[in-house]
Amino acid sequence: MTDGPLQILAVVGSLNPTSVTRAVILHVAERLHAEGCAVDTLDFEKEPLALYNPETAHDAPGFDVLQGRVERADVYLLGTPDYHGSMSSAMKNFLDHFWREFAGKLFATIVASHEKGLTVTDQLRTVARQCYAWSLPYGVSFAEQEDVREGRIASDALKNRLDMFVHDLRVYGTVLARQRHADLAGTEPGFMARHRK
């Protein structure tokens, strides 16, 4: 990001065609687009990603295109269901494919869970930390039928949380994107120095 819009990659980490995770991610993506952000949606139900193999993944057909989409993003909006206290295999598989691309960027997380999604949120924040990315200091979690019904946001509490989430993602995503680009263009020491060309 220099003078252009904030670039957001919205990742739908559910393969269920009627997923409530997808419904909430698409709602947030629409709101961010309306706020002037450039939003690219990566939905594994429509764009399958082969299981990560460190020996062959980077040579797979189409990987370079996906890598370009990941690299362009300033912010990763990550949505996953809570499966047995962990993120979905689709989300973990996506995260396994990348790491350098995440450095200095922002992770913003949404978890569909009847158990508040705390362990899943912590796992996603751990990945961010291991990849030298930032994460919002909170994630949004919600429950099917309680907060989302028939593909629509049903509770005022979730609507309010998502309003805050959209604001914070846009504001802090912009601050971090500007600083990341300044660090990459500069000469000062810092963790982004290793990514300078």
Image: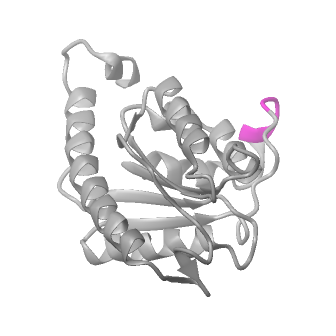
Q: Is residue 150 left or right of residue 158?
A: right
Residue 104 % position (x, y): 36, 33
Vertical side of 39 occupied by 177: above or below: above
Residue pictured at 55% horizontal, 77% vertical: 148
Vertical side of 179 occupied by 190: above or below: above
* Residue found farthest to the bottom: 150
Residue 166 colored magenta? no
Query: Is the stretch drawn in magenta largely helix, strand or loop?
Result: loop
Q: Is residue 164 left or right of residue 130?
A: left
Q: Nearer the viewer, residue 124 or 83?
A: 83
Residue 29 % position (x, y): 42, 71
* Residue 1 in view in this figure: no
Residue pictured at 36% horizontal, 66% vertical: 162
Residue 178 % position (x, y): 20, 42
* Residue found farthest to the top: 189
Residue 117 % position (x, y): 58, 49
* Residue 143 in view in this figure: yes
Q: Which residues are magenta?
A: 54-58
Residue pictured at 54% horizontal, 36% vertical: 122
Residue 56 colored magenta? yes
Quadrant the C terminus occupies: top left
Q: Quadrant of residue 112?
A: bottom right
Q: Is residue 93 left or right of residue 26?
A: right
Residue pictured at 82% horizontal, 46% vertical: 51
Q: Is residue 60 left or right of residue 64?
A: right
Q: Nearer the viewer, residue 29 or 194?
A: 29
Q: Nearer the viewer, residue 130 or 141?
A: 141
Vertical side of 60 occupied by 31: above or below: below
Vertical side of 188 occupied by 102: above or below: below
